[in-house]
Amino acid sequence: MVPAQADESTVGGSIVGQAIEALVVDRQPLFLAALGTLLGAPPMSARVTSCPRSDTALEIIRGREIDLVFCEVRAEPISGLKLTRVLADEQRSVRVILLGDHDDAHELAEALHSTAAGLFTKDATLDEFLVGVQAVLSGHRAIGAGLMGLVLSRLAHQPTNESRRSVSHLSPTELEILAMIGDAESVAAIAVSRGISSKTVRNHLAKIYRKLDVHGRTEAMLWAARSGLTSR
């Protein structure tokens, strides 16, 4: 789970405790039915709509309030990743969790740079999946354990520029804040720890992202981890 910043537009605030309107998009009828049953049962007790096509899903989302979308990454005729981008372009607050088979792990890892709130392989354990969904409902991002190794490996082997390879561009304060981000500290917790405002923390983060050429908190957290800055 990756805590979201207070000012991130890709993930809204917490909707835990509210009646959840969920939409499940998958071409496999058995999986569609099984996931719908799981989401409709406690502890989520969501009102679930299911459909096999992503273009139909888009019409549903545009026609009524949907809180949470579960979409296979290889959805047709619009891929799950493209659907996520369309919804972001339309500035819709719906959270999207992308799902895929084990063979789809690379496609899911590519979606790390999208506004998807969750990324899971379909073989994730039930406990892991439900905890991840609850994290998304609380306003955070969730990445399945089965994807983390691949995500870190991809980031480690990406062609990088000097700003990404070296921390020499970071001030001591920025380096300390990056380490705290790597330890999954929230903006509020960092502010309290350093005796500064949350706005100041976010200003530091913006500078860190620019200097490291990363695209947000998730990448910064992974950058810190693979650079050995974390204590966990």
Image: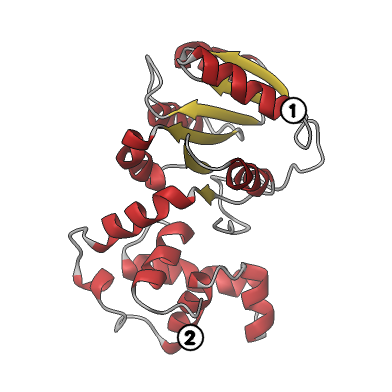
Instruction: Classify mark 1: helix, strand or loop.
Output: loop
What amino acid does circle 2 point to? Thr
Q: Residue furthest bottom?
A: 172
Which numbered circle lies on residue 46? 1
Horizontally, residue 2 falls left or right of residue 89, namely right
* Residue 13 versus residue 54 in the image, above or below: below
- Tell me what residue is drawn at x 41 percent, y 79 percent: 229
Q: In the shown orientation, is residue 145 left or right of residue 15? A: left
| Residue 25, horizontal then vertical, whole percent | 52, 20
**Quick one: quadrant of the N terminus?**
bottom right
- Residue identified by numbered label 2: 173
Question: Counting residues from the N terminus, which is met first, the one under dot 1 or under dot 2?
Answer: 1
Q: Which amino acid does label 1 sit on?
A: Ala
**SS at mark 2 in the image:** helix
Q: Which residue is drawn at 35% across and 70% down?
A: 226
Number of other residues with Cα within 10 Å of mark 1, as a class: few under 14, some 14 to 19, many 20 or more = many
Apparent side of residue 80 relative to residue 133 in the rendered image (left or right): left
